[in-house]
Amino acid sequence: MKIKNWKKSILPKNSLIKDVIYNLNKTKLKICMIQENQKLIGIITDGDIRRGLLKNLSLNDNVLKIIKKKPIIIQEKFSANKINNLLNQKGVDIVPIVNSKKEIKGLYANNFTNKYNEFPKTAVVIMAGGFGKRLMPITKKIPKPLIEIKNVPIIEKILLSFINEGFKNFFIIGHYKIEMIMNYLEKFNSQINIKFIKEKKPLGTAGGLYYLKKQDYDDFIISNSDVITSMNYSNFLKFHKKNKSNITIAAKQENFEIPFGVLKKSKDNLIDINEKPSLNFIVNAGIYILDKKIIIKLLKPKYLKMTDFIKKITNKKIKKKIFILHENWIDIGSKKDLKKARTNVKF
């Protein structure tokens, strides 16, 4: 079918990557068309952005660094039947419509059912066992997952993000004040299938996954209970399955500015001074996908951090992939983070 608001997905070639992200989030059309003199010069999708960020591009880089210059296109004279056949053959959902001069004349979206809208063989696991020591004295009375951000507990925000995308199977794994979390989440019993696993002693961000070994799911999306994001979990799962990954780690590009002049030297000789340099890192976002065989074969019921677990897996046959986030993301691990979340979070 032809998209009515297709003009909103057009950006000029001098746009920045951050402009494309804003456009995709606003239009929800999965594609941004880049033009010059009314003519299509390429397209950008969510995947193009993630691949660009993985190559250490910044949000302020020009779109031409990630543009797909030879996209699949259709002529405006094509029949609907011919268009649908082409889209099915090429395995794409949405394509630009152009005329003989390559001027943009619209967008056409395939009539398809997104198989990732329902996830019967995927379960969501929220790790809710931390003591929240850096958030004391707040966490002396309530567990960290029940701390409110604009009147909504963190764990409820996480749950709703998944529920809104069609996920229905959940596990909450925890130890510290887990009963309070269980009581609060009773209201979701009629909406989703939610099970609680109470650890006899704290098992870290990975150890408690051992108790999922007998569960009949192919994949587990695992989220720390102090992470809030506007990421698309469906795209995350789609990326995991498309790449036939065993472990997929969500990551975020972060810039850190050193507030001093950094000296470059040779022995005691000064070579250069770099004033307040900015360093760019890809950091762990605390959200993962593990396939079931990883959990069955490699986990034991003992204290284990997820990062240590992943580092220990050196088998080359186990595929580990990185999924770069360009969406909003915040890790609420300290009082400073909590204050920032309560002030800035709009998702």
Image (cartoon, rainbow, N blue to C red):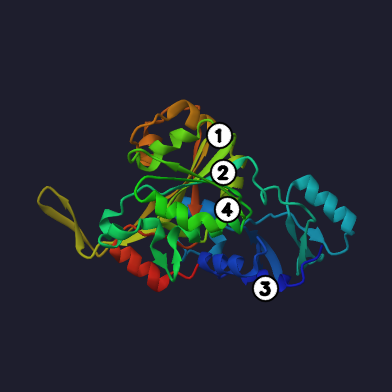
Nearer the viewer's eye, disc 1 or disc 2? Answer: 1
Closer to us: 31 or 133? 133
Q: Which residue is mark 3?
A: 8
Q: Earlier in the sequence, mark 2 or mark 4?
A: 2
Number of numbered callouts drawn: 4
Residue 101 higher or lower than 301, as above or below: below
Tell me which amino acid carries mark 2.
Answer: Ala
- Other-residue count near label 2 (Cα within 10 Å), few / some / many at <14 / 14–19 / ≥20: many
Give the Cα separation between the discs numbered 3 and 4: 40 Å
Tell me which amino acid carries mark 1.
Answer: Gln
Q: Residue at x 54, y 35 (%)?
A: 291
Residue 303 in view of the camera? yes
Q: Earlier in the sequence, mark 3 or mark 4?
A: 3
Give the Cα separation between the discs numbered 1 and 2: 9 Å
Q: Which residue is mark 2?
A: 123
Are dots 1 and 3 in contact, CB under 8 Å?
no
Q: Residue furthest left?
A: 268
Q: Earlier in the sequence, mark 1 or mark 2?
A: 2
Give the Cα separation between the discs numbered 2 and 4: 15 Å
Q: Residue at x 77, y 53 (%)?
A: 112
Nearer the viewer's eye, disc 1 or disc 3? Answer: 1
Q: Secondary structure at mark 2?
A: strand
Q: Which residue is mark 4?
A: 189
Q: Secondary structure at mark 1?
A: loop
Classify residue 87 as left or right of residue 46.
Answer: right
Residue 288 higher or lower than 228, as above or below: above
Residue 293 placed where, x, y %? 53, 29
Are dots 4 and 1 in contact, CB under 8 Å?
no
Can you tell which mark lies on residue 229?
Answer: none
Tell me which amino acid carries mark 3.
Answer: Lys
- Other-residue count near label 3 (Cα within 10 Å), few / some / many at <14 / 14–19 / ≥20: some
Q: Which residue is mark 1?
A: 215
